[in-house]
Structure formats: structure tokens, C-alpha cells
Image (cartoon, rainbow, N blue to C red):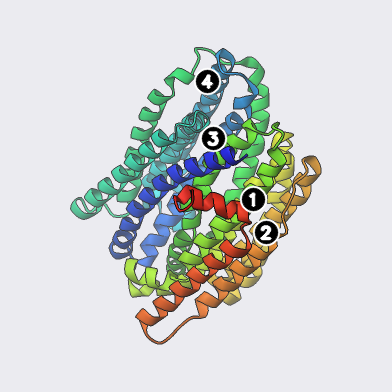
Amino acid sequence: MFAKIKEAAVHTLVYGFGSVAQTLVGVLLVPLYTHAFTPTEYGILTLITLVGTLAGAFFYFGAPSALARSYYDHPAGDLRRRTVTTSLVIVSSGAVLQVLLGGVLAAPLAVAITGSAEFAPHIQVAVATSALASIAAVCLVVLRCERRSVLVVAVNIVSMALTAGLTLYLLLLKHTGIMGPLAAMLVAQAVACVVLLYAVRGALAPRLLGAEVGPQLRYGFGALAIGLTYYALDSADRLLLTHFTSVADVGVYSLGYKIGMSIHVLFILPFSQIWTPMRLQYRNDSDAGELFKVMLTYYWLVGLLATVSVSIFARELIQIVAKSTYIDAWQVVPIVMLAHLVYGSVGLLDSGIIFSRRMSYHVYIFSAALLVNVVLNLLLIPKFGYMAAAWVTLVSYVVVAVAVFVVSSRLHPIRLEHRQLLLVASGVAVLWAGLKIDAGDEALTAAIKLLVLLSLAAFWYSTILNSRERHRLLSVAGWSS
């Protein structure tokens, strides 16, 4: 089992390195966006990007998720290659339909979300970008299953760097306004698609696997329904903020949300990229139950440490990357980070649903959480503004995680550890305390926060990890023979 944990750790680090590199490039763009755009313009860019994301969430037909579930159902060879081809044909069909409809509906969508048809071309570009991203997603599933993590990271970094370079060129030299970053993302995604399709050419067959079409479509449409409800859940707050507050508030909230989502980019996504194929490949092994239990503990340990680290320094971070008009966004960061960490745990709790292909349970759970989210936002945003939206996001994801655990454990028993409760309780307590620290001097305040963070790490090392785990950790670090 240690070898499997090490496998997960190594590939998570590789994917994490790529995410850090991408994030650094993205962080470089934040000052550019916040200085080139007013909060209102930044809010419009956010809403247009959401339209593209939501379109992709529907028209990808769940093909990447279906392929990830079906990949290990067939041995290496012709059947597996035909399975991959089936997924690629399904997602390509959805991408073509998405682009065509995007061209027809761009103008009314632009009027609906921005109040002006002048942003119709912007929406068309955003929709085309998400269509290409869906095709790339199928290719990335293949590469992750083949454990080609270095190639995945390389493609993502080059794509992000190309996006950043083109954005700088279009904004600073061509003065293209909001279209600049959108066009840059489209070009970069097109290049990434070409590279990825070439990289997976050996995993493709000249024909489909008929027996896979039905199961993939059924599983895929279940994943599609989940994706739609997830993106509705994830974006409902900004849409309602646009209605009840100002677009400027949407811009401030979006910046805090973007920084809060760093936990998703830096940890949750890298981990899920290797854990998704691993749990399907090893699900029938004799140590699978122990592996799943311990992995959940390590997920919370690493994830909470990252959440506390970023959150308690959120104010200082925003002072560096944005103008003073965005400073209140720091309050959104810790709540959103914790919310996404809770949501990320679903990938460790839903094994029973995934193994049994009972995707309808996910649909019911996410739909219920969406209802809770919308009702609470409607009640609270008019009174408390965007901070209500942040707290409602956390509540919604807690509802999802608890419901998934209850349902999935009936289909496939999930073993928990008592130390997980101590881990979460102590992490949240230190997070709350760290946000209250203010010594009156910036340097002293930062030093105290750093000391608190190190104390938390030392506490977890001595109480959460057992002696065998501490020895393994020291051995990996080279501090023990």
C-alpha cells in the first residue's frame, strides 16, 4: 500500500508543479487585469467566461468522465483503443454542436448578461474555447491513465504561458480590451488540442467500440447532469450578485473567489488527476479499503495546511496583486478555500457511486444542493452582499459532501479514522485564529502568523501521524535511514 501512496504522491507533486507554474503565470495576469480593467469590466469578463464554461459543461456530453470510468474495464490492446476512440467521437460531436449554437445565440446571451449586444463576439470566442477544452480533456484522461504526468504538465504550462504572452500583447500593444484575454485563451487551447491529439494517436483505433457507446453515453449524460448542476452551483452566486448588487461587487467577489480557488488548482486538481485512475485500477485489490481510508486522511492534512497557509495571508496577497479598490476581497478567500476543499473530498467519498455507475445519486444530491444554494442566496445576498454568497458556497458543498458520504457508503463501505476529526477541527480553529491576528505592525503580524502556521504543522506531525508514518516521512525527506 505504501507503494501506491508513494505513486499518488509522486504524480500529485508532478501535477502540482505544473499547477504551481500555471498559477504563477496566472498570478502575473491578475495585476494586469485589475489595472487594465475597472471592477465593472472585470466583472463582465468573469460573466462571459462563465457562459463559455457552462456551455462546455453541457456539450462535452460527459465523455472524459465516461472514458475514465471505462478505461480499465478493458485490457490494454484493441478494445481499450476503440474505447478511447468512442469517447473522442462523442466529445467532438458535442463540440461542433456547441460552436454552432454559440454563433446563433451569442447576441441574446450578451444582452442578457451584460446588457449590450456588443459582447456577442466575446461570447462566441469563449464558447469556442470551451469546446476545444472538452476535446483536450479526453486526451488528458488517456495521458493520466498512462501515467504520462510530465507530458500533461508540459502541455498545460506551455498553454498557460502562451495565454499569458498573447494576453500581454493584445492588451498592452493592440489595446483589444476584454477581447484580449478571451482571444489569447482560444489560440492557446487550439495549440494544446493539436499537441494532445498527436500525443495520444497510439491510443486510438480506426473504429468505435459499439458495446461502449451505450454505457458511455449513459454514464456521460449522468456526468453531464452533474457538471451542469455543479457549474450552476458554482456560478449562481455571481449571477445573483449581478442582480442584487453591482457589477463592481461581482468584480471584487470574483477576485477573492479566484484566489480562494487556488486550493483547487494547487492541490485538489493535481491530486484528483492521479487519484481518479488509481482508485479504478486498484479498486479490487486486497488493501483497497485501507488505501482509501488513509488517502482521505492525507488529503485533509495536506489540503488544510494549504488552506490555512494561503488564507491567513490573504490580505497581504491582495495588497500585492491588486489595487486598493479590491482589498475587501480578502474576506472571501478563506471561506471559498475551505468550501472547495470540502468539495474536493467528494472524490474520495463517492467510490460506491462511481464503481456501481449509479450517477443518478450524484444528480439528486447536486440538485438538492443547488436548491439550497439558490434559496439561501436569494434570502441573504440582498442583506449581506457578497459575503453571504461566500458562506452559502461553503454550506452548499458541505451538504454535497455529507450526502455523498451517506449514499456512497451504502454501495461501497467507506472506512473513516478518528484522527480525521481532530485534524479538521484543529485546522479550522487555527484558520479562524490566524485571521484575527493583528499586531499593529505588518512585519510583526506576518511573523506571528508564520509562527502559528509552523505550530500547526508541528502539532499535526506529533499527533495526527503515527510513528510509522513519521518514520516514512523522514525517510522520504532523507532525514532518516
Residue 293: x %, y % from top left: 68, 48
Q: Which residue is labeled 2 in the image?
A: 420
Q: Extreme right residue here?
A: 410
For the residue marked with disc 3, what is the amino acid? Tyr
Tell whether label 4 touches label 1 (CB within 8 Å): no
- Category of crowding for the residue at label 3, using alpha-carbon neighbours closer than 10 angstroms: few (below 14), some (14–19), many (at least 20): many
Front residue of 479 and 74:
479
Residue 102 image point, x, y percent: 46, 39
**Residue receiving disc 1:** 296
Q: Which-is-in-front pick, marks 3 and 2? A: 2
Residue type at numbered disc 4: Thr
Count of labels shown? 4
**Of the pair 360 and 288, the residue shown nearer to us:** 288
Distance from Cα at disc 2 to Cα at disc 4: 41 Å
Label 2–label 4 contact, CB within 8 A: no
Q: Secondary structure at mark 4?
A: helix
Query: Against 378, is 441 above or below?
Result: below
Badge nearest the viewer, 2 or 4: 2
Dots 2, 1 in contact, CB < 8 A? yes
> Residue visible at 50% across and 68% down?
332
